[in-house]
Image: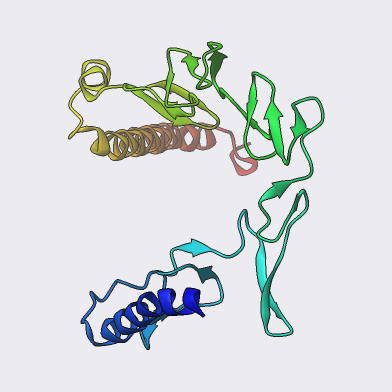
């Protein structure tokens, strides 16, 4: 009885504070991730939980569903636990399972040791899996093209500057008109050749016609004998 009497003021104070909280205007984003403030507390969506709906019920891609009115997590392959927080599988040869987590070898990282530590470089052996990238790459895992390089296919190549293009091919503004000019020139040249050929044949035919007529006139006729 004495303990209850001792705790009663604290219970009363907590109840009063809870009731007062209902009347205090809160910022619109007090309840996170779509939660709604109702009767002094946040009512969360199925996906989230916590005082302000700040944490996911199911981790690592787990799916939420209700069983007998309670939210449970359906975990993907390689995961277990109430919130899919425990790992049960590691990529063979890339890591080993220790206390619900994968301890990855030097060149691998990720939840299941499924990702390379360095995509386009080599690990330096540091505690933070730092990478020494090739000259064309940068980023935490050498996954990005370095300055002055662009991605072509699956690799980074040096970027060609406009000044280099100008030096090699002339003004950039004139390049779009190069092909039409060349095409028109070719068509004009072909037309000229055809015209010259036709004129030459016509002249030869015209010049040879009188000689044939003269040869016909010079032949003796049967009536002349």
> Which residue is located at x 43 percent, y 74 percent?
7
Q: Can see residue 35?
A: no
Task: Note whether 22 is above or below 29 in the view shown.
Answer: below
Task: Note whether 80 is above or below 49 in the view shown.
Answer: above
Task: Note whether 69 is above or below 126 in the view shown.
Answer: below
Q: Residue furthest right?
A: 92
Residue 196 or residue 1, whichever sits in front: 1
| Image location of residue 39, percent across then percent down | 37, 88
> Which residue is located at x 50 percent, y 26 percent?
141
Residue 72 or residue 161, whichever sits in front: 72
Q: Residue 5 appears in which quarter of the rendering?
A: bottom left
| Image location of residue 41, percent across then percent down | 39, 80
User: Would you say 28 lies left or right of 153 here?
Assistant: left
User: Would you say 61 lies left or right of 35 here?
Assistant: right
Task: Note whether 83 is above or below 38 in the view shown.
Answer: above
Residue 165 or residue 59, whichever sits in front: 59
**Image quarter in which the C terminus is found:** top right
Q: Residue 224 appears in which quarter of the rendering?
A: top right
User: Would you say 116 lies left or right of 185 here?
Assistant: right
| Image location of residue 40, percent across then percent down | 35, 83
> Which residue is located at x 51 percent, y 31 percent?
215
> Which residue is located at x 24 percent, y 87 percent?
23
Q: Can see residue 128?
A: yes
Q: Residue 34 appears in which quarter of the rendering?
A: bottom left
Q: Residue furthest front?
A: 2
**Coloring scheme used:** rainbow
| Image location of residue 4, percent across then percent down | 48, 78
């Amino acid at each position: 009885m004495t303990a209850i009497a001792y705790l009663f003021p604290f219970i009363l104070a907590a109840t009063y504070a809870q009731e007062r909280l209902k009347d205090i205007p809160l910022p619109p984003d007090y309840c996170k991730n779509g939660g709604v403030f109702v009767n002094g507390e946040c009512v969360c969506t199925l996906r989230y939980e916590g005082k302000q709906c700040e944490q996911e019920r199911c981790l690592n891609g787990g799916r939420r569903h209700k069983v007998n009115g309670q939210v449970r997590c359906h975990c993907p392959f390689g995961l277990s636990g109430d919130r899919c927080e425990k790992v049960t599988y590691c990529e063979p040869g890339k890591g080993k399972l220790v206390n619900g987590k994968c301890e990855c070898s030097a060149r691998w990282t990720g939840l299941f040791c499924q990702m390379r530590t360095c995509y386009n470089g080599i690990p330096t052996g540091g505690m933070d899996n730092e990478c020494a990238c090739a000259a064309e790459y940068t980023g935490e895992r050498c996954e990005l093209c370095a300055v002055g390089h662009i991605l072509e296919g699956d690799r980074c190549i040096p970027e060609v500057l406009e000044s280099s293009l100008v030096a090699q091919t002339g003004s950039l503004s004139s390049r779009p008109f190069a092909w039409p000019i060349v095409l028109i020139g070719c068509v004009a040249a072909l037309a000229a050749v055809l015209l010259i050929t036709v004129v030459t044949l016509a002249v030869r035919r015209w010049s040879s016609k009188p000689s044939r007529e003269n040869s016909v006139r010079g032949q003796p006729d049967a009536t002349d004998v």
